[in-house]
Amino acid sequence: MKNILLTGCGGQIGSELTLELRRRYGNDHVVGSDKRVITTGPLAETGPMVSLDVTDAAALAEVVKKYKIDAIYHLAALLSAVAETKPQLAWNIGVNGLYNVLEVARENNCAVFFPSSIGAFGPSTPHNNTPQDTIQRPTSMYGVTKVTGELLCDYYFRRFGVDARGVRFPGLISNDTLPGGGTTDYAVEIYYAAIKTKKFTCPLPAGTFLDMMYMPDALNAAISVMEADPTKLIHRNSFNVTAMSFDPEIIYREIKKSIPDFVMTYDPDPVKVGIANSWPDKMDDSCARAEWGWNPKYDLASMTADMLKVIGEKHAKGLI
Ligand code: AKB
């Protein structure tokens, strides 16, 4: 990869992945793009940054040609809970946006990274040790767009040779940019609440197990699958990747080890509960491990220690 474009780079993954890719490939070779105009902060100050709506195919093609792009990390999408409130918009960004990316990749010989999700599974999927290849009948619009995206990526590789690769991300936990509108967002918000007010109201009930991952491992997954030796890839696209699985009680107890007077109560959000109950409790990611060496570094204890340290420092400086 010589010149990389990220779409949706102002979001939870993109804000950190853009900077990591710039560290690895050189600032000038990594172009950030977002629908919002971003003119200040690290994204705008460390490398090229453009305003781009992925549903505008002509504008996307212009950026790809101008910067001689040969790899696209396509991150623009609505998250699961917000997608349920705006299903038409979720389809337009999630599917038509990806179609535009794959078409421009076909015409300009670009590789494509597509982040699928645990949301690509549904109630009829086996929930424990969810296999790589299994039933995918999601009941959320987010899930429908993710399954469609997985199939489109497979099609563009088979039919046109577009090097489209990707992973199925679990809930991602980070201490930089907050996620917005996801079902797993509680697992980020709980750390901020523990530091700021020592009180948290959880939108998912006890016993709701979901796969999760700390952001440094997620960045590594996205980059490693794109750098993987293609001759070793049997699946290429939509790899299950996970680092841990927990329910709200388990993360609460882990945080309480450091903040004993932290208190969590429950007020389940019906939309999030419905989505979470349709997702796996724990995926089997052995194909990613075997085909390209996936091996996450953080577990719940090490992630919690780092989250509380970083968010605690930001709070002490009055930044949050
Ligand atoms: C969401 O909750 O929507 C995302 C996801 C698991 O894809 N974090």
Image (spheres, helix red, strand yellow):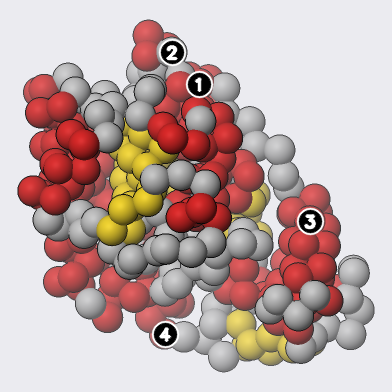
Could you tell me which residue is drawn at 14 percent across and 41 percent down? 61
The residue where tag 1 is placed is 292
- Which quarter of the image is occupied by the N terminus? top left
The residue where tag 4 is placed is 270
Amino acid under disc 1: Trp
- Which quarter of the image is occupied by the C terminus? bottom right
Image marks 2 and 1: residues in contact by CB distance under 8 Å: yes
Percent x, y for residue 211?
Answer: 56, 54
Badge 2: few (under 14), some or many (20 or more) residues near its Cα, within 10 Å? Answer: few
- Compared to 195, does 72 lie above or below? above
Image marks 3 and 1: residues in contact by CB distance under 8 Å: no
- Label 1: state its secondary structure: helix
Percent x, y for residue 71?
Answer: 32, 30
Corner quadrant of residue 155: top left
Distance from disc 4 to disc 3, alpha carbons, whole Å, reads 31 Å
Distance from disc 2 to disc 3, alpha carbons, whole Å, reads 32 Å
Distance from disc 4 to disc 2, alpha carbons, whole Å, reads 43 Å
The residue where tag 3 is placed is 306
